[in-house]
Image (cartoon, rainbow, N blue to C red):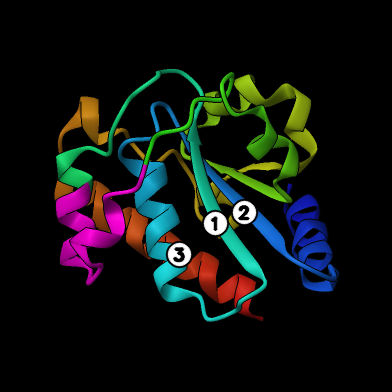
Amino acid sequence: MKEKIEEMIDEIGQKEGEVQVLFICSGNIMRSPFAEYRARQLLERKNITFKSGGVIYRNTRLSSETHRYLVGFGLQSKDLTSFRPMYINDFLEIFEEADLILVMEENHLNYLENYIEKSFLLTEFVGETGDVLDPYFEGQMDIIYNQLNELVIKLVEILSE
């Protein structure tokens, strides 16, 4: 797996034009939008765009908890109002256009078999192990959002090299 990750990092680094990174979670209301907005906030490179989507549940808005945590990390509330969750079957183009897909849980990879060559568990991509737990079901908001923040910081460092 490490070799596949290194190949992907090299491919992204050599790509001319825009690189699209897609974060995936179950419902696109907590973990993946947090990662999307936090990565946008942290990364200076203009040729990388971040999006997010869900593979299990359809939803209509960002969770209030995610909104609160993002504001706590310095994002403006007004910048989050336009967010709309994207479900895989309704927005296949974002999956097709993505250069790199990063999932929060290993089981999310099962929904991405058509995109498996460019799909990775976020934790593994940044040199960690395990899933990013779902705060919707697990609670532990502070622990999960802080873990996710650290993972995004590591990702941004990798993409900035």
Tell me the kind of residue under disc 1. Phe
Residue with the mark numbered 3: 39
Q: Determine crowd level at label 1: few under 14, some 14-19, many 20+ residues with C-alpha closer than 10 A.
A: many
Q: Are marks 1 and 3 in contact (CB under 8 Å)?
A: yes
Q: Residue at x 43, y 74 (%)?
A: 42
In this view, 4 is above or below 117: below
Judge whether residue 42 is colored magenta.
no
Query: How far apart are the alpha carbons under marks 1 and 3?
Result: 7 Å
Query: Residue 50 shows which numbered tag?
Result: 1
Q: Nearer the viewer, mark 1 or mark 3?
A: 1
Query: Mark 3 falls on what kind of element?
Result: helix
Q: Nearer the viewer, residue 108 or 41?
A: 41
Q: Quadrant of the C terminus?
A: bottom right
Rendered view: 5 above or below 42: above
Image coordinates of residue 82 in percent, x first then y, are: 34, 48
Asked if the residue at tag 2 contacts the one at tag 1, i.e. Cβ–Cβ closer than 8 Å, the answer is yes
Dot 3 and dot 2 residues touching (CB under 8 Å):
yes
The residue indicated by pointer 2 is 21
Q: Amino acid at mark 2?
A: Val
Q: Secondary structure at mark 1?
A: strand
Cα distance between the residues tagged 3 and 2 = 10 Å
Q: CA distance from mark 1 to mark 2?
A: 5 Å
Quarter of image, res 159? bottom right
Comes first in the chain, label 3 or label 2: 2
Name the side, left or right, on which 140 lies relative to 82.
Answer: left
Q: Earlier in the sequence, mark 1 or mark 2?
A: 2
* Residue stretch rendered in magenta on the structure: 67-83
